[in-house]
Image (cartoon, coloured by chain):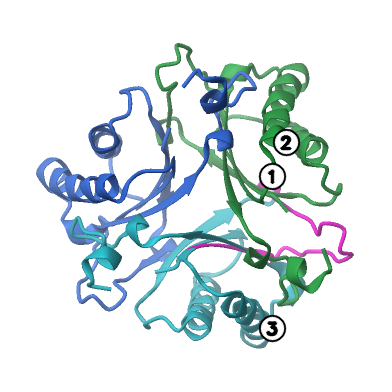
Chain colours: A green, B cyan, C blue
Amino acid sequence: MPLLSIDVLEGRSDEELRLLLDTIHTVIVEAFEVPEHDRYQILNQHKKNEMIIEDTGLGFGRTDKVVIIRMTSKKRTQEQKQIFYKLLAERFEQILGIQSNDIMVSIVENSDADWSFGFGRAQFLTGEL
Amino acid sequence: MPLLSIDVLEGRSDEELRLLLDTIHTVIVEAFEVPEHDRYQILNQHKKNEMIIEDTGLGFGRTDKVVIIRMTSKKRTQEQKQIFYKLLAERFEQILGIQSNDIMVSIVENSDADWSFGFGRAQFLTGEL
Amino acid sequence: MPLLSIDVLEGRSDEELRLLLDTIHTVIVEAFEVPEHDRYQILNQHKKNEMIIEDTGLGFGRTDKVVIIRMTSKKRTQEQKQIFYKLLAERFEQILGIQSNDIMVSIVENSDADWSFGFGRAQFLTGEL
């Protein structure tokens, strides 16, 4: 159920994009212990002047590989979120060759009534999920 | 005031897109009892590899007609949300020929101070709304 | 850290877009008293039929210059938000020639654990920020 909106710059091949989305999903499954098919990803590709992503003065740069992950999810613990960030950084480097200065994540939480996966029902309320 | 971000795959005609947006809006007006001109819709059209929308293991498939509705709104009751999901499914089938397995909704709530509709003011705080 | 998603219609030049983003950022820095490099902006350009932005019946129109600003941020006071809306309206008119009927803002708040700016860490939790 986490719903992910992923923003990147144009220029990756279809294969690279697929590997990016697959890698993010394996981390979601592992960090939040959700089912394999709990996958909801929307990718947005941007021209270079459409993304300005700096560092809050932390003292590092970003490259054209920068990936912004915006996640909407029901409540997750602080611990789960920290595992998520850590795994993302590890896998992005190992699998995608993206360094951890190029990852930014922002999470927004909502409640059981805020999700419908289809069929006109709120599956977290009906007990289906 | 609900602000809607609607994600679909490319390939619909302008007429189909308009009917989609109109249908969503009539359901918003009915389910949340908002004024007719309380309409704030942003549509995002995607290439096929930019949306991966599965089923959390609930046991159904999605088609290329899939529509993701992300809504930001002030507080709404659980009941209103459930009416919203139900009406969406009914109208999508009746009016758009979109089956209810192709609808996903995610809602995020915020507060009165979080909205400005123009003129540099927070209209829910000033009493204008 | 506020993360901004900015939606506009296609048709502005690169220079106009840059000035728009710069103007929004100076208002962010001033209203929320964040560091100069606390800049995270994603711009989305839309075809005309992809944005339907009305007025909740408040009695004014929008033009093709309309700008929707969606901000995700940690908690901000009501006062800060109101300053933000006010400054936006002033600067948009002065610097961009955009009237205040063409600005809409929606804010969503989250918490310290909900942000990672890179390096696999939640910088608001580690004390780095």
Residue C92 at what x, y percent from top left? 18, 46
Q: Is residue B27 magenta?
A: no
Q: Which mark is residue A76?
A: 1
Chain letter, disc 3 residue = B
Q: Which residue is mark 3?
A: B93
Marks 1 and 3 belong to one chain: no
The mark lying in front, picked from 1 and 3, is: 1
Image x and y of residue C129, in percent: 46, 22
Compare residues A54 and B124 and report the one nearer the observer: B124
What numbered label is drawn on residue A80? 2
> Is disc 1 in contact with disc 2, using a CB cutoff of under 8 Å?
yes
Label 2 Cα crowd, 10 Å radius (few <14 / some 14-19 / many 20+): some
Q: Which mark is residue A20?
A: none
| Quarter of the image where the N terminus of chain C is located | top left
Q: Secondary structure at mark 2?
A: helix
Determine whether the residue tagged by mark 1 lies in a helix, strand or loop.
Answer: loop
Q: Is residue B58 magenta?
A: yes
Chain of the residue displaying label 1:
A
Q: Is residue B21 left or right of residue A75?
A: left
Q: Does residue C100 appear anywhere in the picture? A: yes
Amino acid bearing label 2: Gln
Residues in magenta?
Answer: B49-72
Q: The numbered mark 2 sits on a residue in which chain?
A: A
In the orientation shown, which residue stands out farthest toward the left?
A: C94
- Which amino acid type corresponds to the residue marked 1 in the rendered image? Arg
In the displayed structure, would residue B22 be above or below residue C81?
Answer: below
Residue sitting at x 24%, y 58%: C102
Q: Quadrant of residue C3?
A: top left
Query: How far apart are the two marked residues, 1 and 3, measured between alpha carbons?
Result: 34 Å
Cα distance in 3D space between marks 2 and 3? 39 Å
Q: Is residue A99 left or right of C64 when viewed as pictured?
A: right
